[in-house]
Amino acid sequence: MSRTKDLLSAVAAAAFALLLVGCGGSSTNAPRYNTATGQHPTDWLQNHWAEFAKSPSQCTTCHGSTTDPLTAGGISKVSCFTCHPKGPGHPTGWEAGLQHGRLGAQAAPGEKTGFAYCFKCHGNNISAGLTATSCLACHTTSPHPSKPWSGPDPAKSVHYATDAANVPECYKCHANGANSTIKPATPAPAGTAPGCFNNTMCHSKSI
């Protein structure tokens, strides 16, 4: 009986070792994978997009396909599609202007929308970042769309169509009126949360 238990223990240990090698070996170069615990670090959910953007293929050994939900899950039995129903990366049809413009970058921040989503992979200056793709290759005025971006008539001024929840991203370039011909009348007190009309960026009050 004891020999049987020893044999089963040895088989289980070998299987676990193979699992670790499969997920964390040099052949897959799985990012920040702890072979002792068989897990990613505790902050992985917050930061895994950065590693995915560098090389999506490094995730497939453990998690299966990142493009086909029917073959996703891999040996870890954890599918990317569990959290990303349409798969990681840009959704289908992203090339269409409205998808990654008015309905994408300018939309309320979400899993795949808002300026913060763009900046994650393309960098705060959207000139490459973690990817080799620069938004400026097609959009020479990025992150702003084509003119009229601003102007006295809100109905014709494109940035009024940008969801206000994107303000923290706008603030990165426009704190205290930087990179703008419009300046706040009086700078906001230190520590003031970025807003459209509270002196933190370009405007002092609602137009």
Image (cartoon, helix red, strand yellow):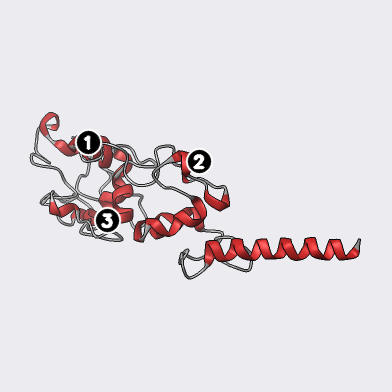
What is the spatial separation of the Cα atoms under label 2 and label 3, in whole angstroms? 25 Å
Q: Nearer the viewer, mark 3 or mark 1?
A: 3
Measured from the top left, where is residue 8 in percent x and y? 79, 60
Near mark 2 (Cα within 10 A), the count class, few <14, some 14-19 or many ≥20, is few
- The residue pinned by badge 2 equals 82
Quarter containing the N terminus: bottom right
The amino acid beneath tag 3 is His
Query: Is 24 on the left-hand or right-hand side of 176?
Result: right
Between residue 167 and residue 110, name the one nearer to us: 110
Residue 129, compared with residue 155, is above or below; it is below
Measured from the top left, where is residue 39 in percent x and y? 59, 60
Q: Write the residue at 23% across / 50% down.
A: 201
Q: Earlier in the sequence, mark 1 or mark 2?
A: 2
Near mark 1 (Cα within 10 A), the count class, few <14, some 14-19 or many ≥20, is some
The amino acid beneath tag 2 is Thr
Give me the disc on residue 122: 3
- The residue pinned by badge 1 equals 102
Q: Nearer the viewer, mark 2 or mark 3?
A: 2
